[in-house]
Structures are given as structure tokens and as C-alpha cells.
Image: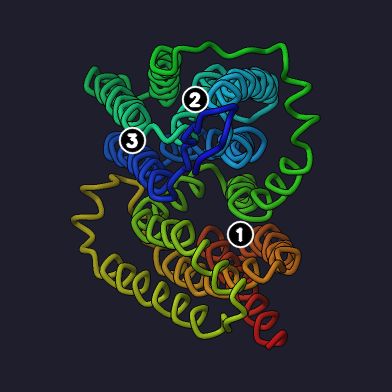
Amino acid sequence: MTQVLGDGVVTLARPRPGWRVADQVLSSLTVAGLSFAVARTVEAHVFGVLGLVLLVAGFALGITRALVSDVYLIQFGDVMPRVRRQAARDATGAAVALGLASGALCCLMSAVLPGHQTRMAVFAVGLALPGLLVQDCFRFVFIAAGRAAPALVLALTGSAVQLTVVALIIRSGQHSTVGVTAGWGTAALLTAALGCALARLTPSLRQVPVWFALNRHLTVRLSVEYLLGLGSLYLAYCLIGAVVGISAIGALWAAQMFLVPAYLVISGTVALLREPFARRAEQGRPLVRPAVVTGLLLATVTALWGLALVALPDRLGFHLTGESWEGASTVLEPAVIGVVLVGLAVGPALALRAQGRGDRVRRASLVRAVLLLALGMIGADLGGVSGAAVGLVVAHAVGAVTLWGILLRRV
């Protein structure tokens, strides 16, 4: 994209969806690698504590992206470099503020949680959140500027440092979740400092209130969409852990780690097909057929991956996740069905958004979110972690059917 300024022409960067997908792949694989590394060396209960830590961190990251990083990507991807640079200072400053606020909240909440190890782990993740949120925001700064090289360097360095620190802690015999979390947070803080150096800017806290005031039209919508999507699933996991026990979170989290490739295929497809669906809608062409093809293709791919996982020998499962495999294996089949249903729902969601019916998608997401929380807890109360997994599957099924019903009814 170009913009005329005075007598000259300035070329503006346009963020590419592929860069966002690549960043998400690296982030997801880093979390999966960390999870597998810890699961092999600790008891199922301790891995459940780590699962809770990762849920808290993941929830905070998702909210920060909705309030800051995604907003920055949308608002400042096609502006003048000097404007984008100042916005980058404000955005990273907002990430610092959110990191400090959410970290303080975690530290306060840790005082009322049951179990000494759980309390200390949540306290540790509270200390780690500022670094985690800021280093994540800096990657979006580079993506918005069209600078693939520093974004890749930051992502690779962050992954390498985090995994190395955690591996050294584990090799030293310190299998405590608190130590792993503290090491993980320290690595993220170092990566955030590297982001400052690569971007040649420091976060500014002076414009934080102005940032949220000026971008309220985006932050509210993006936050609601996150809470109705992945956020509600994370909250459901926490509630299931409260009903069944912390080991249930470890079982559910371990099963999800095996499904990371399937989720990456789904998220990558959404990112890459959003614009083609929008162009097709602008041209007045029907969207039902591409929606059906997209949904069925994703359902097929994820089902094939799931079948391979279900056939995984117990010996290999124990090798990858240690004691947590016993719990993960009991919920793996429902988890596979759940991801297949998520893939099936992508087609109508893309079509409805392309038609400007994002409100209908949010209504269907609200139904699914409520059912995730309600059926997850009811299933946990009736049948333990297996019952909770079945309840989550029913919620995913209702969400997928609702989306397809809305799209086909419009036709």
C-alpha cells in the first residue's frame, strides 16, 4: 500500500496473515514442548498445577491481545512509520500496565487458593505475567510494521530461551512447578528486553488511559469474542479442576497438547481464508459451498490426526507425558471429537462473518460458552474428568449445529 505525503510517495507495510500464523505456530509449539518436558518428569498432580499456570497465562495473553496487540495490528498496520512507532510505544505500555495489573491480581488470588504448591505457582505466574505480555506484544509490533526478520528472531529466541531455562531447571532435579514457572517468566522478561532493543523503543505508560479510550470500539468486541471462544474453554477447565481436583486440569491439558497440530491447522485456515471469503461476499457470490468444503475438509484432517492419536500405544503415551498419560488417555477420544466439531464449525463462521453477520456468530458462541461452563461442571460432578470431557463435547456439538443452522436458514 502507498500513501502520498507532500511531493513524495511513502510505501506502507501491510501485515501478512502468514506471519501471524507462523508466530502462532511457534508460540503453540513452545508451550507444547514445555508441557511435554515437564509432564515426563513430574507426578500427575504437579502437572495439573502446571496446567493451571498455563491456563492463567494463556487467558491473560488472550485478553491482552484483544485489548492491545490485535487492536494495534488492525489500527496501525497501514499508517505512516512515525505514527506506527508512537503507537507501538503506547501499545507496549498498555501491555506493561495489563501485565502489572493481572500479575498483581494473581498474587492476591494465590493467598486464597487451596494447596501450598498451587498458591506458590499462581504467585509465580503473577510475577511472570508482565514479561510474558510485553514480549508477546512486541512480536505484533514487528508484524504490523511488516518486519518479518525481527519478529522471527524474537519468536525463535523466546522459544529457545524459555525451553532451555526450563530444561536446565528440570535437569537440576528441581521438579517444582514454582521453579519452572519462575524460569519461564525470567526467560520471557529477557525476551521482552530483546524486543525493546530490536524495536529501538521503550514502552510508554503515559498514554495508557488514552489508548483504551480511543480504541474502545475494537477492544470491547475483540474481548467479547475471546471470552466467548477460547477464554470460556479455559475457564471451563478451571471450574472442572475445582470440582474434580487439580489432576483433572493436567489430564485435560495433556490431551490438548496432543491436539496442538490440529488446532494450528484450524487457526491457520481461519487466518488464510478470512479475506477470500470476504472478497467472495463482496462479489455477491454464494458462500454455502465454500463453507461446506472448508468445514468438511477441516473435520476430515482433524479426524485423521485424532484417529492416529487414539491408536497411540500406551507405552509411547507414558514416554511423552509420564504419569499424566493415564488421565489424558481417558479424555483423549472426547477431546478428538471436540476438535473435529470445532473444525466443522469454521466454515459457517467464516461465511457469516464475510456476510457481515458477526453478531450471529457471537450469539452461537455465547450458547456454546454457557454450555461449556454448565455441562463441563455437571459432567465433572456426575462422572469425574471423563464426564466433564463428554459435557465439553456436547457443548461443541451444539455450537457447531447452531452455526450451520443460522447459515442454512439465511440461504
From the image, tell me which residue sits under label 2.
132
Q: Is mark 1 on a helix, strand or loop?
A: helix
Q: In this view, does 117 lie above or below 215?
A: above
Report the Cα–Cα distance between label 3 and label 2.
15 Å
Q: Residue at 50%, 12% (x, y): give it.
A: 201
Viewed as shown, does residue 139 lie left or right of 116? Answer: left
Viewed as shown, does residue 199 lie left or right of 323? Answer: right
Nearest to viewer (mark 1 / mark 2)? 2
Residue 116 shows in the view: no
Q: Is mark 3 on a helix, strand or loop?
A: helix
Mark 3 neighbour density, 10 Å: few (under 14) some (14–19) many (20 or more): some
Q: Which amino acid does label 1 sit on?
A: Ala
Q: Are marks 1 and 2 in contact (CB under 8 Å)?
A: no
| Residue 34 badge | 3
In the rendered image, the residue lying farthest to the right is: 213
Nearest to viewer (mark 3 / mark 2)? 2
Residue 295 image position (x, y, % from top left): 47, 76
Report the Cα–Cα distance between label 1 and label 2.
32 Å
Viewed as shown, does residue 148 lie left or right of 231? Answer: left
Residue 325 shows in the view: yes
Between disc 1 and disc 2, whose residue precedes?
Answer: 2
